[in-house]
Image: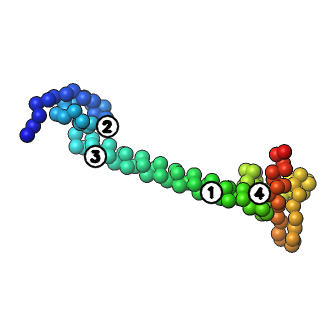
C-alpha cells in the first residue's frame, strides 16, 4: 500500500531537495541513507577512541595523586614539567628528595603539594 502524501524535503546527507512519501523520511535515496549511516558509525568510533585516549592520559595521574612516594618521572608528570626540570628543582633545593641508593630518588607527595602553598 502506498500513501498519497508528497512532502518536499531536504536530504540530511546531500542537502538536495526531494519529494518524500512519508513524514519521517530523512534522505533522498538509499545511497544517502547508507552513507549517512556509515558517517554516523565512523563518528561514534572516533568519539570512542578519543574517550579511551583521554582515560589513558588521566587515569595514571589520578593514581599518582594517591601515592605517598614518587619517582622523579612521576613527580614531573604530576606537575606537567620535564624530568630534567624536576632534577633541577631537586638540585637547587626547591624540592626535597631522598636517595635511598645512588640510582634511586624518591620525592614525598607532600613535597609537591608544598610547592603550591
Ligand atoms: Zn541525498
For the residue carrying disc 3, how many other residues have a C-alpha within 10 Å: few (<14), some (14-19), or many (20+)?
Answer: few
For disc 2, the marked residue is: 13
- Quadrant of the image occupied by residue 83: bottom right
Q: Position of residue 60 (x, y in %)?
A: 65, 58
Tags 4 and 1 touching, CB below 8 Å: no
Identify the mark at residue 59; answer none if there is no mark.
1
Query: Could you tell me how far apart the alpha carbons at marks 2 and 4 are, in whole angstroms?
Result: 49 Å
Instruction: Specify whether 63 is left or right of 9.
Output: right
Identify residue for label 4. 75
Q: Residues within 10 Å of mark 4 (few under 14, many from 20)?
A: many
Task: Answer yes or no: is residue 88 visible.
Answer: no
Name the side, left or right, on which 91 lies relative to 63.
right
Q: Whole-percent x and y of residue 29?
A: 22, 39
- In x, y percent, where is residue 85? 81, 53
Residue labelled with disc 3: 34
Q: As drawn, which residue projects farthest toward the bottom?
A: 101
The answer to whether one can see residue 61 in this image is: yes
Badge 2 vs badge 4, beta-carbon distance below 8 Å: no
User: What's the residue at 31%, 35% (across, down)?
Assistant: 12
- Mark earlier in primary sequence (4, 3): 3
Image location of residue 49, percent across then percent down? 49, 53
Q: CA distance from mark 4 to mark 1?
A: 15 Å
User: Mark 1, mark 2: which one is toward the viewer?
Assistant: 1
Q: Secondary structure at mark 3?
A: helix
Relative to 71, say whether 88 is above or below. Answer: above
Badge 1 crowding class, 10 Å Cα cut-off, few under 14, some 14 to 19, many 20 or more, is few
Amino acid at each position: 500500500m502506498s500513501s498519497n502524501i508528497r512532502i518536499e524535503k531536504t536530504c540530511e546527507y546531500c542537502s538536495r531537495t526531494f519529494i518524500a512519501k512519508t513524514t519521517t523520511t530523512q534522505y533522498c535515496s538509499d545511497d544517502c541513507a547508507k552513507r549517512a549511516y556509515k558517517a554516523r558509525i565512523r563518528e561514534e568510533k572516533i568519539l570512542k577512541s578519543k574517550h579511551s585516549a583521554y582515560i589513558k592520559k588521566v587515569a595514571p595521574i589520578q593514581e599518582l595523586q594517591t601515592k605517598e612516594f614518587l619517582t622523579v618521572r612521576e613527580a614531573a608528570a604530576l606537575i606537567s614539567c620535564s624530568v630534567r626540570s624536576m632534577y633541577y628543582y631537586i638540585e637547587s633545593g626547591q624540592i626535597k628528595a631522598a636517595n635511598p641508593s645512588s640510582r634511586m630518588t624518591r620525592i614525598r607527595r607532600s613535597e609537591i603539594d608544598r610547592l603550591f602553598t
